Image (cartoon, rainbow, N blue to C red):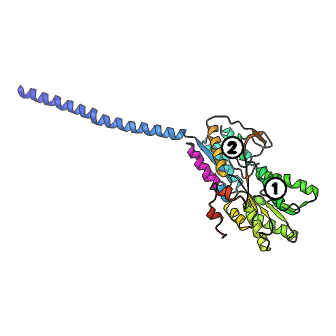
Amino acid sequence: MMKKWIKLIIFVITLVLAVTACKGGVVQKNYSKQAVSEEAEVEDVMIEKKIKIGFSMDTLEEERWLRDRWMFLDAVEELGARVEIMEANGDEALQISQAETLINEGVDVLVVVPYNAEAAASIVQKAHSAGIKVISYDRLIKNSEIDLYISFDNERVGELQAEALTKLVPKGKYVYIGGADTDNNAHLFKKGVFNILQPLINRGDITVVYDQWTKDWLPANAFLNMEEALKANNNDIDAVIAANDATAEEVIKALEVQGLAGKIPVAGQDAELAAAQRIVEGTQTMTVYKPIQTLTMEAAKAAVRLAKGEKIETDTKISNGKIEVPSILLSPISVDKANIDETIIVDGFHLREEVYRNVE
């Protein structure tokens, strides 16, 4: 009888220990896995909710646009958002396709540097159909209902170029080498240049002996344009205004062939390192500095605000052929040999040792 009771007690104790082990071990272990899983899901949701900006760029072929890419990326991340960047390398169809990819990925806001100002209107339409707002970055997208345009005062860029050269050459024969006809900025640059030149042309002080666009902004095309301008005028040219520093470089190469580099004033814009070096060397007269860091930060702030559903009020509106677009326009700065140290070097845009590398 006693043995039976002992066996019963042992059985009960064993059963209790087994149940306890089950509760403290297996069940606890399963609960821990569930907790880890739930925590991971919460983290995933937090990542998914992080604002995502799409950045569709025309090209990275020029130094200037590389700066925009990295500075915009840094600015967006500083604001706690993230960015997906795609570059079309000057391919209109590819840019539209890449923009569609960004839209399909569900970006909260799409920022576009258009290759073709007119064709990019289809990107805006597709984005709006998906409930995504669009910022036109540095170049204005034409004939579309874009939500915001942010850039520098590009008409003023052209005015600064012309003002600098007309102080040096108030009378004479001028050549204008423009940018791509498909880029709205190229038209604004030119408009600004002729705001200054036209009164002098009307007075008979200045004659524009050559005026041509540079197809696709390709430097090789700028070189051919300048070659043609020199040939058509038997090298009798007094000043050249180029739409940007990349085209100015090709203008100077064409002048070098004729032994004229440094003898004919040349204006550019973008404040590229090579242009800054040419300025201190004496082959390029001036450039126009557009503080890219200011532009990228303002664009990043605007993109995040739009993503949060905030409305952005601006003092300026610019017509793109369809609507008056709310616009943020930043001020450009004229840079020549006299103020290069106090502008792009002081700002850290370029290092002094890099700018003066080729001069004593």
Task: Report the residue marked by disc 2.
Answer: 135
- Circle 1: residue type: Glu
Count of number-bearing discs = 2
Badge 1: how crowded within 10 Å, few (<14), some, or many (20+)?
Answer: some
As for residue 182 lying within the magenta part, the answer is no
Residue 93 location, x and y as percent?
70, 53
Q: Which residue is drawn at 77% across and 52% down?
A: 157
Mark 1 vs mark 2: in front: 1
Q: What stretch is highlighted in magenta?
A: 67-87
Q: Can residue 60 be seen in this view?
A: no
Q: Residue 205 sits in which quadrant?
A: bottom right
- Circle 2: residue type: Ile
Q: Residue at x 78, y 50 (%)?
A: 156
Task: Report the residue marked by disc 1.
Answer: 163
Q: Nearer the viewer, residue 68 or 140?
A: 68
Secondary structure under the numbered disc 1 in the rendered image: helix
The quadrant the N terminus occupies is: top left
Q: Is residue 55 left or right of residue 334?
A: left
Q: Nearer the viewer, residue 165 or 143?
A: 165
Q: Is residue 65 above or below residue 173?
A: above
